[in-house]
Amino acid sequence: MASSTSGSSRLGRPARLSQDAIVTAAQLILDRAGPEQLSMRRLAKELSSTPMALYHHVRDKDELLMLVLDAHAARFSRPKQPTEPRARFVTAANLLYEVLADCPWIVEILASDDLLAVSALWIVEDILDAAIACGLSEADAVYAYRTIWYYTAGELLIRMTRNRRRAVSEGPSHRDKAFAKLDPEKYPRLTSTASNWPQLTERDTHKRGLEDIIDAIIARCAK
Amino acid sequence: MASSTSGSSRLGRPARLSQDAIVTAAQLILDRAGPEQLSMRRLAKELSSTPMALYHHVRDKDELLMLVLDAHAARFSRPKQPTEPRARFVTAANLLYEVLADCPWIVEILASDDLLAVSALWIVEDILDAAIACGLSEADAVYAYRTIWYYTAGELLIRMTRNRRRAVSEGPSHRDKAFAKLDPEKYPRLTSTASNWPQLTERDTHKRGLEDIIDAIIARCAK
DNA sequence: ACCTGAACACCGTTCAAGT
DNA sequence: ACCTGAACACCGTTCAAGT
């Protein structure tokens, strides 16, 4: 009875679904339609299956998101580190950002779990290692990592919500409208800097921020 | 026919609901039950009303959240600033954190809108002003504010999701389990710093991070 | 073991109607 | 003007049943 299908020498009939197929389909939805479009129901539809079939391969939605992050991080290979300690630190920290910057759905994971996909652990490892190479103690290295992580997560969060807004409504954003009716008497600084707020080169700016933070931590820990 | 109720000299009958009452009730739910418990339906129930009645006083849930943030920020009075520029900068930046640190529901707003509640504008104003007093250009002041804001938002986001986790399940967190089965060969730094990760004095640590960031930006912009 | 259909207990929001 | 009930178009997840 088994393996009546032509060519296949596997035992039993193949499962219609697999964790791999589910994760791949989820990534497709996230990339094409955004995180708010990813529901178990829609994912099932995309796979020509039923919502409940998914729960046979994945514990719940949180685990699914974690698996997606894992698959994403696995696509990045661990690069060779510069030898000069500070450059190594900056490179490692920037990589954390680069790995996450292109996936807007990451916020969904941030909001539901720690960021510790197994495939991404080497990023944390490299940052800690670079920090220690710069002369920081282990406790200071952890502190440095955390500062960098907060800065990065915050940037991602804000940028993603701005993108979401833009996608939803084409009109002026809440912030634009708020700026428009600022009282210059009460808020002179906000008024005069208004033209500086529309930001452009986000990636470069983030890297500059990282360098500032790293230099500050090195300087304080050295003295 | 009007004002047949004893004592009241108002015209017409009083509205059963008001924006104020709705916002107050929403704050109560957020403080007592957390952001994931705040739904229009539950809020209506708390007010002995129907979900749809709310929409007469509030455009949608996003606007409601914004109003809640506004009411929260309005409870803080603008403090006197120190005269010394750097101390002013640190104080102003730290205040941004203090205003937000006690409201775990803030993340819900971060994820849905810019943080520009009208009542909170003076915080941004003070940070910009302090930065300029430290000798930064207007463009650099905006950059400094943004760096501080990302750092703060990231900290809030991560801390809040950790609290949420803890509230849901009492068992060891995802991160604790991940640390437990780390391969020391592959991740020596992560392994040896593991004991440094359980963090305690978050508020002090955040302030230290702020000082580091501020010093770095001042230093780079000065040279 | 793997999958299905129906159901549970929710969401935010719209619409047409009531006073 | 203010409020209501019913409905629309969704969620994640559980349960009992099918092969």
Image (cartoon, coloured by chain):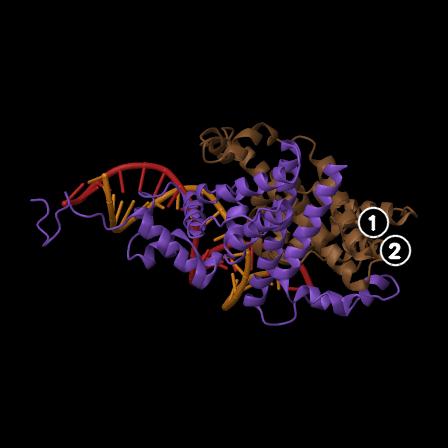
Chain colours: A brown, B purple, C red, D orange
Q: Residue at x 62, y 72 (%)?
A: B171
What is the secondary structure assignment of the residue under circle 1? Answer: helix
Image quadrant of residue A63?
bottom right
- Image quarter for residue A94? top right
Task: Mark yes or no: residue B162 visible.
Answer: yes
Residue indicated by mark 1: A89
Instruction: Name which residue type carries label 2.
Output: Ala
Comparing B203 with B196, the one in front is B203
Q: Residue furthest right?
A: A83
| Chain of the residue under label 1 | A
Please check whether the numbered discs 2 and 1 fall on a single chain.
Answer: yes
What residue is disc 2 on? Answer: A133
- The residue lying at 57 percent from left, 57 percent from top is A52
Residue B115 x %, y %: 52, 43
* Whether residue B194 is situated above or below residue B130 in the rendered picture: below
Q: Position of residue A176 (x, y in %)?
A: 51, 31
Q: Residues within 10 Å of mark 2 (few under 14, many from 20)?
A: some
Q: Secondary structure at mark 2?
A: helix
Asked whether, in this view, residue B140 is left or right of residue B79, the answer is: right
Residue B31 position within the rendered picture, expressed as x and y whole percent measured from the top left: 44, 60
